[in-house]
């Protein structure tokens, strides 16, 4: 999204390359009216953004935690930000070590959410 809206710039305003930047830095850059003008966007306003955040949680679990959900706050040091211990998928599950149990229906729903996000961006002339 950043590459398209910024006119194919590969660097964010903070000079980080888009390919290695933190997600929060990308989202902040997308909200920056000084840079993007009328193309600025806050994807968090999209009605299904919570599902996109679940996709992020799942992918982080597969990349960093051997397919496990975030560990509870008690398993972290005091310096760990609270958001790192928040479970969006099965938020009421209090077990320390919990695998993601994804059904085909879950996966199809997440893919649909991403498709709808891209359609929403296009319909709002962001792409």
Image: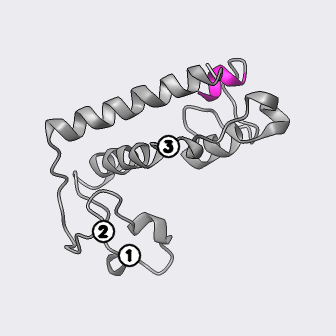
The image quadrant that residue 21 belongs to is: top right
Q: Front-most of 118 and 17?
A: 118
* Residue 125 drawn above or below residue 79: above
The residue located at (38%, 75%) in the rendering is: 76
Q: Disc 1 versus disc 3: distance between alpha carbons?
A: 32 Å
Which element carries disc 1, helix, strand or loop?
loop
Q: Is residue 22 visible?
A: no
* Residue 72 drawn above or below residue 113: below
Instruction: Tell me if 33 is positioned left or right of 104 in this view.
Output: right
- Which region shows up in magenta? 1-6
Q: Are marks 1 and 2 in contact (CB under 8 Å)?
A: yes
The residue located at (63%, 23%) in the rendering is: 3
Residue placed under numbered mark 2 in the picture: 71
Q: Is residue 99 visible?
A: yes
Residue 111 is one of the magenta-drawn residues: no
The residue located at (55%, 44%) in the rendering is: 23
Dominant SS of magenta comes to helix
The quadrant of the rendering that contains the N terminus is top right
Q: Disc 2 versus disc 3: distance between alpha carbons?
A: 27 Å
Q: Position of residue 14 (x, y in %)?
A: 74, 42
How packed is label 1: few (under 14 Cα within 10 Å), some, or many (20 or more)? Answer: few
Residue 5 is one of the magenta-drawn residues: yes
Residue placed under numbered mark 3 in the picture: 47
Which element carries disc 2, helix, strand or loop?
loop
Chain-order first, disc 1 or disc 2: 2
Chain-order first, disc 2 or disc 3: 3
* Residue 56 drawn above or below residue 85: above
Residue placed under numbered mark 1 in the picture: 76
Q: Disc 1 versus disc 2: distance between alpha carbons?
A: 8 Å
Q: Position of residue 44 (x, y in %)?
A: 57, 46
């Amino acid at each position: 999204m950043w590459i398209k809206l910024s006119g194919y710039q590969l660097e964010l305003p903070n000079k980080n390359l888009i390919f290695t930047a933190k997600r929060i830095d990308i989202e902040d850059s997308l909200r920056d009216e000084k840079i993007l003008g009328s193309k600025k966007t806050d994807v968090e306003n999209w009605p299904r953004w919570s599902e996109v955040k679940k996709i992020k949680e799942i992918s982080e679990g597969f990349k960093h935690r051997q397919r496990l959900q975030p560990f509870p706050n008690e398993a972290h040091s005091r310096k760990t930000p609270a958001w790192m211990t928040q479970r969006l998928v099965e938020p009421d599950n209090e077990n320390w070590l919990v695998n993601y149990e994804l059904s085909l229906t879950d996966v199809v729903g997440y893919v649909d959410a991403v498709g709808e996000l891209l359609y929403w961006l296009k319909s709002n002339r962001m792409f």
